[in-house]
Amino acid sequence: MVERVTTLMANPEKIRNIGIVAHIDHGKTTLSDNLLAGAGMISTELAGKQLFMDSDEEEQSRGITIDSSNVSMVHSYDGEDFLINLIDTPGHVDFGGDVTRAMRAVDGAVVVVDAVEGTMPQTETVLRQALREHVKPVLFVNKVDRLINELQVDAQEMQIRLGKVIDHVNKLIRSMNEERYKAGWKVDAANGTVAFGSALYNWAISVPMMQKTGVSFGDVYNYCRAEDMKSLAKDCPLHEAVLDMVIRHLPNPLDAQKDRVKTIWHGEADSKIGKSMSSADSNGDLAFMVTDISMDPHAGEVATGRLFSGSFTRGMEVYTSGSARKSRVQQVGIFMGPERLEVDKIPAGNIAAVTGLKEAIVGSTITTLDGMVPFESIRHVSEPVVTVAVEAKHTKDLPKLVEVLRQVAKEDPTLQITLNEETGEHLLAGMGELHLEVIAHRIERDKNVEITTSQPIVVYRETVKKRIEPVEGKSPNRHNRFYIYVEPLAPEIVGLVKSGEISMRMPELERREKLIAAGMDKDEAKAITAIYGTNIFLDMTRGIQYLNETMELVIDGFEEVMQAGPLTREPVSNVKAVLVDAKLHEDAIHRGPAQIIPAARQAMQAGMLLAEDSLLEPYQKVFVQVPQLNMGGATKEMQGRRGVILNMSTEGDLAIIESRVPVAQMFGFAGEIRSATEGRAMWSTEFGGFDLVPANLMPEIVGQIRERKGLKKDLPKPSDFLGL
């Protein structure tokens, strides 16, 4: 097997890098199992029950996928062998970060949709992630047997329902990226970009498969009615239908990289490395993007990612973006589910697993070319909204806990970790309660550190409501002065920053054009000096002596304020800070960090308070499916949590309620909705953005946060920061 894989690796035309994406419980891992069984890697009897890709015991016990896992397998199509590098991704909203990172490594995605439930919120999210990364989708409609046997639909109704699922997926693709949709990215049963089947019973059918096997939709219906799934699986094996579709319709690395490199890398397209990446040249300079870091008890950190150019071999020396030191590659290999197999060499166009890259974090660019422009950083769809405080149970474990938390943050970049060396309190911010529960469990199980965690608390954001006149910030020695004003950042610009369409890495001209198109003034667009989170800093000064030398320090002050605002020390969002004037001492010794940073920082802190510093709270969209009889209980439950009902619709006797609820009100929701609907509600959530805290709740919430953080009870005033 390994020999076949390594031979195919060297031929990019014979490679397909794919991800399997879907809403939770729509059957991704079961599908992956059957594809592996088809490739002869696990037994057919166990496929669908073994959940080979959910190798972690936490995943097995909870019955959900938590981590993305990779596997390489060989599939024969039209008498030729192809190498398929597959990533099985999680469907739960709390682990959406894994999906985003996996999308950077692959070129195509198999979108799985449950035939009974249809497209769900998370289906929409994963499709959006795929299209943003220029990853081409094909569709697998799963659980078709449930339509026939549980819902008792007839053959005609079955086809109508399946048609609706395809239409809805196309509607999503079109609304997210019309250009791609028109360029042939719509999914279409007639041309073979849609397959139907049952991952659990290991059968699938598509139009090309029908032509090949002579099995029609009517036959499928009759087999299911007779509950003869075994014969159906023998006539129409799942792996054949799905993998044939992948090979026929999803691009190989040569075709994909021509298009994708432009999206994820902003260097010169005509440079040597630019051309090498576009053509997946295995003899070019190395260009590797890290999309995942995991721990191997024997080999240490394993960095997995996509190799766009060059070849990995053991012992080679490489640069890591953001680090001055070189690293030496110790082992190169590929993943086979939980197993990692060492190989001698991995050429461009493959997904590689490498050890020895000590400096690497998720999103790092690894290269042999000194000074290479790094890949665009990976933008996650949702943000950390829930925090727990973590403490070591035994004092002796304190130093080890700090080390372990740093390691955990490296493995999962959607976690935000704040270490407070003075108080010994460490804060862990994640995507939801389940996310943090899983991380805490893994710290105890894998890292052998016993910990206690606090009740979950919500992460708020600070922002400003209005524009103010410039505020003067003085340095402690009174020799340097900065004049800075703050104002809310326009929603259009916030959108560009969030989606990663503008960044400080991209060419200035391209960034300026995008900002002007979004409505920003030309002079302001020219003046952008720093972007931090969804906040920007502008230098609108002209010809001020020594400012160039001190600008780094001014930006340090800006970043400090954006990390922790003046009102509650929570992160800041959607603020524009503008430097309009400065007076600097001519002697460099009087313009050191101890003078410049406080002066810039205090001007912005006082400015934010003058501009009506307010709090934004995170929301979740909550989707509930419930029988109409129990609908009243469900809507009452939402409204009792400060929720707003956005939409209500019915399908048969089911009511579908879509609402938006503050995260602070969502704790304990699972138990309450069960009792309110006699256990009949099915529900799912997705990140719903941030909104201003209602004015009547503001004093109470600010007071609670300040008390929790040990800040003074009295609210800060602008004069506190200006030394007046």
Image (cartoon, rainbow, N blue to C red):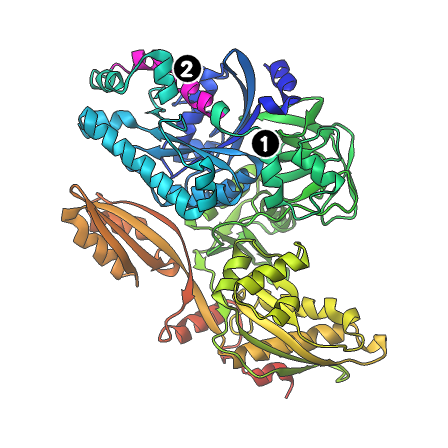
For the stretch drawn in magenta, the main secondary structure is: helix
Residue lying furthest bottom in this view?
Answer: 724
**Viewer-side label of 1, 2:** 1
Question: In this orientation, which residue lies closer to the viewer: 520 or 459?
Answer: 520
x then y, percent, for residue 122: 39, 43
Residue 357 in the figure: left or right of residue 23: right
The image quarter in which residue 592 lies: bottom right
Q: Position of residue 47 (x, y in %)?
A: 41, 20
What is the secondary structure assignment of the residue under circle 1? helix
Q: Disc 2 residue type?
A: Thr
Picture coordinates of residue 636, whole percent (x, y): 21, 58
2 or 341: nearer the eye? 2
User: Residue 320, relative to residue 56: is it above or below?
Assistant: below
Q: Where is residue 188 in the image (x, y as percent from the top left)?
A: 37, 31
Q: Is residue 478 left or right of residue 106?
A: right
Instruction: Report the side of 318 relative to 342 (left or right).
Output: right
Magenta part of the chain: 228-246
Q: Circles 1 and 2: CB distance less than 8 Å?
A: no
Q: Can residue 292 be seen in this view?
A: no
Q: Is residue 308 visible?
A: yes
Q: Which residue lies furthest to the left in this view?
A: 629
Total labels: the figure holds: 2
The residue drawn where x is 35% and y is 75% is 696
Mark 2 lies on residue: 44
Q: Is residue 238 magenta?
A: yes
Which residue is label 1 attached to? 255
- Image quarter in which the C terminus is found: bottom right
Residue drawn at point x = 75 percent, y = 76 percent: 595
Q: Give the vertical position of 502 relative to 682 (above or below).
A: below
